[in-house]
Image (cartoon, rainbow, N blue to C red):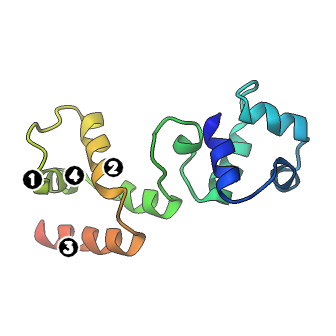
Amino acid sequence: MKKLREMRLSRDLTQDDLCDFLKISRGTYSRYEHGEITISSVTVKKLSEFYNVSADYLLENIEYPLSLDKLKVINELNQKDIEFLLGTDKNYFKKPATLEEKQDKVLELLRTMNIQELRQMLKIIRALNA
């Protein structure tokens, strides 16, 4: 799992540092990084909280990191909020058709915002749609 290694190295941590935190052997952690064994859900949760990124990012299901705080706010978006956001993107000519495409597009639009901007934007959207 390239992401585990990237996250560890970006914070100048050693495998031993993570092993101490997770209370696992170095061999087990090394096998996680090399994708030789499956990481338990408990370990994924600990690592996502430690790095403050989504489990999906760690597991390489998405290509860009989202903080857990951002995910909480994004999860508050309802269908009306999503449609509003997609309607404000002037560079996007073909509207996404499926819910999954819409969610992906919204995540792409919101990933660069900090948590305060995201919360403020959600308040504005809700006020406009009231």
Q: How far apart are marks 1 and 3 (CA)?
A: 18 Å
- Identify whether 95 is placed above or below 90: above
- The quadrant holding residue 99 is top left
Amino acid type assigned to the residue bearing label 4 in the image: Ile
Q: Distance between the residues labelled 3 and 2?
A: 18 Å
Amino acid type assigned to the residue bearing label 3 in the image: Ile
Disc 3 target residue: 124
Measuring from the top left, give residue 100's x and y in whole percent: 30, 35
Of the two numbered discs 1 and 4 in the rendering, the one whose residue sits closer to the viewer:
1
Circles 1 and 4 in contact, beta carbons < 8 Å:
no
Q: How crowded is mark 1: few (under 14 residues within 10 Å), some or many (20 or more)?
A: few
Give whichever of discs 3 and 2 has the lower sequence position: 2
- Residue placed at 27% from the left, 49% from the top? 106
- Residue 111: mark: none
Give whichever of discs 1 and 2 has the lower sequence position: 1
Circles 1 and 3 in contact, beta carbons < 8 Å:
no
Q: Name the quadrant of the C terminus.
A: bottom left
Residue 31 falls left or right of residue 41: right
Measuring from the top left, give residue 36's x and y in whole percent: 75, 24
- The quadrant holding residue 88 is bottom left
Disc 1 target residue: 90
Amino acid type assigned to the residue bearing label 1 in the image: Lys
Disc 3 is placed on an element classified as helix
- Residue 82: mark: 4
Amino acid type assigned to the residue bearing label 2 in the image: Leu
Residue 32 falls left or right of residue 20: left
Disc 2 target residue: 107
Q: How crowded is mark 2: few (under 14 residues within 10 Å), some or many (20 or more)?
A: some
